[in-house]
Amino acid sequence: VQQSRAADAVSSKPWQAAVMADDAHEEATTTLERQQKEKEESDLRTKAKAKAEAQANEELDEKISKKVNEQTKTALASQGLNSKRLPLRPGLPPCGLFMRKGTCKHGRSCLWDHPEPETNSEGYPLRPGQLACALYRRTRTCKFGLLC
């Protein structure tokens, strides 16, 4: 129908064809802009949904990990080992290397105690009676982690 109108318009008044072409161009541009906005909104919704799902999965994984870690620590403690699978020997002095470095080169054959470090909710060691590390006090993080 539009083509027949366009043919009639061109034959009767040439400027009407230009007006119709401008109208068609505006309509096409408007439609294209609307489609782009709808696509952007859809993309944003999809990204937000994916982010929410990823966060939920991460929280679930964290809960499972904590539960498994607790169960693992309990099982290892019943075998006389700490979470790093080094011997727990209550009553003996702590292993100096383990207390300084967090590891022990003698492993399970070490004669000294390898106590579990007491940590706060962020995984940093509790040091009763001592000031917190200066870096930790400023930034609430420390690159030394358990060895802070």
Image (tube, rainbow, N blue to C red):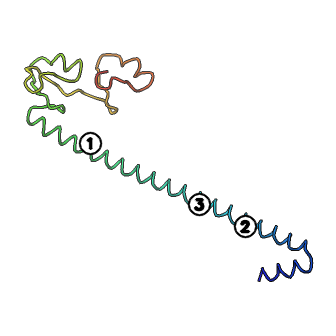
**Secondary structure found at label 1:** helix
Q: Which residue is mark 1?
A: 66
Point out which mark residue 28 bears. 2
Q: Is residue 8 above or below residue 102?
A: below
Q: Considering only vertical position in the picture, is 56 above or below 6?
A: above
Where residue 54 sits in the image (x, y, percent)? Answer: 40, 51
- Asked if residue 23 is positioned above or below residue 53 in the image, the reply reads below
Q: Earlier in the sequence, mark 1 or mark 2?
A: 2
Q: Residue 81: where, in percent of width, then height?
A: 12, 32
- Where is the C terminus found, in terms of image quarters? top left
> Which secondary structure lies at badge 3?
helix
Seen at 88% across and 74% down, the residue is 16
Q: Is residue 27 found left or right of 139 in the rendered image? A: right
Say which amino acid is labelled 2. Answer: Ala
Q: How many marks?
A: 3
Q: CA distance from mark 1 to mark 3?
A: 40 Å
Which residue matches tag 3? Answer: 39
Which mark, by number, is residue 37? none
Q: Position of residue 94 (x, y in %)?
A: 15, 19
User: Considering the numbered disc 2 on the image, is that residue within a helix, a strand or a loop?
Assistant: helix
Name the residue: 41% across, 54% down.
53
Residue occupying the point 33% across, 50% down: 60
Q: Residues within 10 Å of mark 2 (few under 14, many from 20)?
A: few
* Residue kind at label 3, given as amino acid type: Lys
